Image (spheres, grey):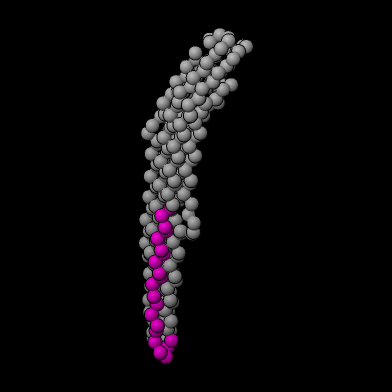
Amino acid sequence: MSTKGDILIIGEDGSKGADGVNTENIDGAPGSSGRNCDCNWASGCKDSTAGGNGLDGGNGADGSNGNNGHNAYPATFIIDELIGSIRVYSAGGNGGAGGNGAKGGNGGDGGKGGDPDGDGAYECDGSNGGNGGNGGNGGNGGNGGNGGDGTTVEITLTKGEKENILTSTIESNYGKGGKGGEAGSSGKGGSPSGSSGSAGSPGQNGNDGTYKGSESTITVK
């Protein structure tokens, strides 16, 4: 908000929405390694097992909406005598920006498959690795707040030139929407032959506020 003036009648700007914060680790855990094949010439083989699949990453936290700008309060001034000039500025507060979304969690890697083995006449194959987990989606950005309205300002000048009271006002602006969080990356497939997971989707950007506040009306009598 511009504050160029000797007398200011302005609404407070709306505060920015809080950014999304992941309160815990949302990365997917990796898959466990598979059991290796175990062969013994006297008793045969104990088969291998596949690696475990990686877990999916969690979704990022959303950003909060920005707060609306405050309206300016009406004001009345009486100037008994004006020497020189004075500037009077009035406007509502700007809307706060939306908070940004948090990043999605990464998918966990797939676990390694069990290895093959052989002993004497016995042998068994290894197993495939686990699949990687999917990445989580980014959090959505918060919406921007609307601008606050201006007000009415009345100035009564008892002695002096009215032209030396310089007045200005503008429409307050709305807040911008927050940015969506980054997507979580996919987990890698475990060796051998495990498939990679899919990456998450980025969060949606928040919407800008929709309303610019009205200008103030400043009257000099």
Q: Quadrant of residue 30?
A: bottom left
Name the one closer to the observer, 176 or 111. 176
Return the x and y of residue 179 as percentages of the image width and height. Answer: 43, 42
Please report the residue visible at 49 percent of the width from the left and 56 percent of the height from the top.
23
User: Most prominent secondary structure in the magenta stretch?
Assistant: loop
Please report the residue visible at 53 percent of the width from the left and 10 percent of the height from the top.
162
Please report the residue visible at 43 percent of the width from the left and 86 percent of the height from the top.
40
Q: Quadrant of residue 196?
A: bottom left
Name the one closer to the observer, 94 or 29. 94
Q: Is residue 176 visible?
A: no
Name the one closer to the observer, 209 or 159. 159
Return the x and y of residue 55 as percentages of the image width and height. Answer: 41, 63
Name the one closer to the observer, 86 or 13. 86
Q: Is 50 inside the magenta-drawn segment?
A: yes
Where is 87 relative to 117, above or below?
Answer: above
- Count of numbered marks: 0
Which residue extends farthest bottom? 42
Return the x and y of residue 74 as percentages of the image width and height. Answer: 48, 26
Please report the residue visible at 39 percent of the width from the left and 84 percent of the height from the top.
45
Return the x and y of residue 118 as percentages of the image width and height. Answer: 42, 81
User: From which residue to which does the magenta span run?
Assistant: 40-60
Q: Is residue 133 visible?
A: yes
Which residue extends farthest right? 83
